[in-house]
Amino acid sequence: MIVNMQCSITLKNLDLDDKEARRKIEDALPDFRFDVFAPPVVPLRGLPRMIGSSEYGHASLRLGDTFAHLIMQYDENYQDDWNKCFDYAHKRIGELREALQSVEATFQFGGIVIQYVMDDFPEPVTTLSESVSKVSVGERKLTHLQIKFSFPYRENYYINVEMEPVQNEATSANALGITIDVNNRLAKQRSDAPRVVDWDDLVKIEEILSGIKSSTLHQLVEKGEFAI
């Protein structure tokens, strides 16, 4: 099941001291109710200037002069339906993109993260050690195992995957957690073919993530293969 999805964007040219800019953002996101904070006396990186949440609390948004961070939480009506989760995320991310474009904010980097919990692996450490990492500690019991790997994808993107034991918050049962992060940082890092990144990158990141299905993750856990 998908627990949540997050979209993080690094920005330039977003001036939240401008009342008109704040008004445009609020008008473009009518489902959100915002609190606005005065700038700190000493500038602090990562400090939000606007914090908002949707009417029923399924989406929350933090905005600063250099970033936007959107979190979408899924309840039992969505968690097991991959398509519904992605449809909701696509709607919210599209609204955020339009709001930021309305104030001429410049897109620098972006990424979308999925947090996924698999309940059908009640012994997640054993599953990971036997199927993915082949870790052995002899007769001793392995009590925790965390696996991370990253790779470039389609020349301009990174896919980062993290796997570790978690607890299902609803049932307190042992489960396997998988976090998948797709971002466009590779596009800026490439010295051989640097290019201008833009808002279309965020759309392409959504497309990459939508190609990852529940069956993809089961194949990763059971066979150690991540096919995308």
Image (cartoon, grey):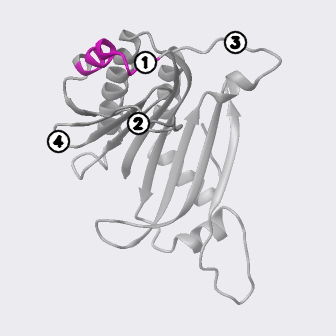
Horizontal and vertical percent for residue 104? 43, 9
Residue 57's disc number? none
Asked if residue 136 is positioned above or below residue 147 in the image, the reply reads below
| Residue at the spot 50% in from the left edge and 37% down from the top edge | 42
**Magenta segment: does it hold 23?**
yes
Horizontal and vertical percent for residue 119? 40, 64
User: How many numbered tags mark residues here?
Assistant: 4
Horizontal and vertical percent for residue 139? 71, 90
- Residue with the mark numbered 3: 195
Say which label, 2 or 4, has the lower sequence index. Answer: 2
Secondary element under disc 4, as helix, strand or loop, is loop
Q: Residue furthest front?
A: 41
- Residue with the mark numbered 4: 56
Say which label, 1 or 2, has the lower sequence index. Answer: 1
Q: Are marks 2 and 3 in contact (CB under 8 Å)?
A: no
Relative horizontal placement of residue 47, taking residue 155 as reference (left or right): left
- Residue with the mark numbered 1: 15
Asked if residue 9 is positioned above or below residue 141 in the image, the reply reads above
Q: Nearer the viewer, mark 2 or mark 4?
A: 2
Asked if residue 209 is positioned above or below residue 223 in the image, the reply reads above
**Magenta segment: does it hold 47?**
no
Magenta residues, as a range?
14-26
Residue 48's disc number? 2
Say which label, 4 or 3, has the lower sequence index. Answer: 4
Secondary element under disc 3, as helix, strand or loop, is loop
Question: Dot 2, how many residues are within 10 Å of its Cα: few (below 14), some (14-19), or many (20+)?
Answer: many
